Amino acid sequence: MSRTVSAIVAGAASAVAAVAARDLFQRKHALLRNYPLLGHARYWLESIGPELRQYIVAANDEERPFTRDQRRWVYASAKKETNYFGFGTDNDLEFTSGYAVIKHRTFARSVPQSTPQAGHSAIVPCAKVIGQAHDRRHAFRPESVVNISAMSFGSLSGNAIEALNRGAALAGCLQNAGEGGISRYHRHGGELIFQIGTAYFGCRDDDGRFDLTLLRDVVASAPVRALEIKLSQGAKPSLGGLLPAAKVTDEIARTRGIPRDRDCVSPSRHAEFSDTDSLLDWIELLAEETGLPVGIKAAIGDLDFWYELTELMESTGRGPDFVTVDGGEGGTGAAPLIFTDSVSLPFQIGFAQVYRIFAERGLSEKVTFIGGGKLGLPENAIVAFALGIDMVNVAREAMLAIGCIQAQKCHTDTCPTGVATQNDWLARGLVPEVKAERAANYIRTLRRDLLKVAQACGVEHPGLIGCDSVDILTGRTVSTPLDAVYGYEPGMGLPSDADRRAVIRLMSTQASEGGSAPPSATSVG
């Protein structure tokens, strides 16, 4: 036995000596040349730095892009566990400039529902009918103000896409297929928005050109409710994309309509239009050929495009049926750091600037506005609704709901929970049928919280929350109304009178739970 132990010790010592010798004479790392063996500890600690900060070092509200409290709320909501928090807020309200505070009302026409599960099964439809203003043949009112944002098969695993699609079907919401085309994983009951990117994946010919016939075919073969032309994305505006050939599986190649043995490149610009006027022509062509509402998605930078777009809409009657505004704080599978950190405006600033341009021309009531960029958290979504958003898209929050642990390895193909990877072994860990329930639970819970806050503000629906219900703190002793912060005129941010009346009627047909007790015989109210 002692000989075995001695042999093991000798072997270990020899291995350590060999590593030390290699470190001393290698020329790549100065740290290892100067500190052999010990230097490896630094690299190891660096490699697990995100996990250390996430689980041990960072406070509840420090970690980014989602804090521990935010992740805990999503996880608990997805599992139908209690997502309440005890003892009071640990956020620094008094000294956080830009902190949003929602103002409840003492008396109003809408009574908040008080029980924890109240509103969990409520239907919260969009306050607007998408495509109605332009008389699209297949105009429709989305059943949910919360929908799943654009995430492509190829960026996410097939199992993750399937879980989200099944979850969308259970929650009665839409799933944006992303620019990677519609795969078999998108065909499990959830209704879709088909996104058309610069490479025209899923509707392109063998030479990579847009093919209208293929578009009509894919729309006919799947439950597609609308088309979205992607102009740019918040985390990497004005950039194309690259899926290396090594990651292009046979299934991805078939779904996108691309060769199997080449890098999959998305250009930075569209080939079917070259200016605002030709963009509007293309929108009208797609709408006429498919009958579907057609919208555009963009991050916000230079506002000249939006001024020109609204001027042409006003003068010609052409225009998108919906506008998806993606904030610079939004996510992506991979992008240069400078783009994720510093290119395109954050959601609130960018959207408010664009909304004002539409509102000043009397066009805001004719367009459905969709927002993205960390709007899957109730507090962010409420401010977005007050600013004029009609629906919110959730992406990374939906990923968290189906198992993402914020490992931030999306670009490495080594996602440990099988969400953002094409590695079959890793993807097998994600069971779509199980995670679908969690995706649906999260979406229902977010809708429930939005509805509860709307009722606390005295209205029946999140889309009816006005700017007067939100103040922005600028210090311990100063708060500024939201409309003053963003230069809104009275009435901006709300749907038309007709849309407001319609959505109030829709909400009034649902049973109320957990309001007030019956009045006594001596009540004076």
Image (tube, rainbow, N blue to C red):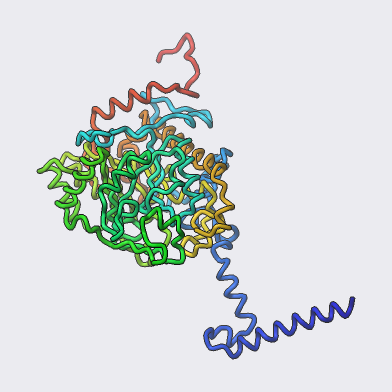
Residue 81 falls in image quadrant: top right
Residue 389 falls in image quadrant: top left
State the residue in front, 503 or 353. Answer: 503
State the residue in front, 91 or 57. Answer: 57
Position of residue 20 in the picture relative to residue 115 (left or right):
right
Please state the horizontal and vertical placement of residue 66, each as a whole percent of the image.
48, 53
Q: Quadrant of the C terminus?
A: top left
Q: Residue furthest front?
A: 206
Position of residue 377 in the picture relative to residue 36 (left or right):
left
User: In the figure, 70 relative to 523: above or below?
Assistant: below
Q: Residue furthest top?
A: 521
Q: Residue furthest bottom?
A: 25
Please state the horizontal and vertical placement of residue 490, each as a whole percent of the image.
22, 37
Residue 3 falls in image quadrant: bottom right
Position of residue 521 in the picture relative to residue 387 (left or right):
right
Tell me if I can see residue 108 in this picture.
no
Q: How many marks?
A: 0
Tell me if I can see residue 175 in this picture.
yes
Taking the spot 53% from the left edge, 60% from the top edge, the residue there is: 423
Please state the horizontal and vertical placement of residue 297, each as a whole percent of the image.
29, 50
Q: Quadrant of the N terminus?
A: bottom right
Please state the horizontal and vertical placement of residue 505, each as a whole percent of the image.
33, 23
Taking the spot 27% from the left edge, 29% from the top edge, the residue there is: 499
Taking the spot 37% from the left edge, 51% from the top edge, the residue there is: 181
Q: Residue furthest right?
A: 1
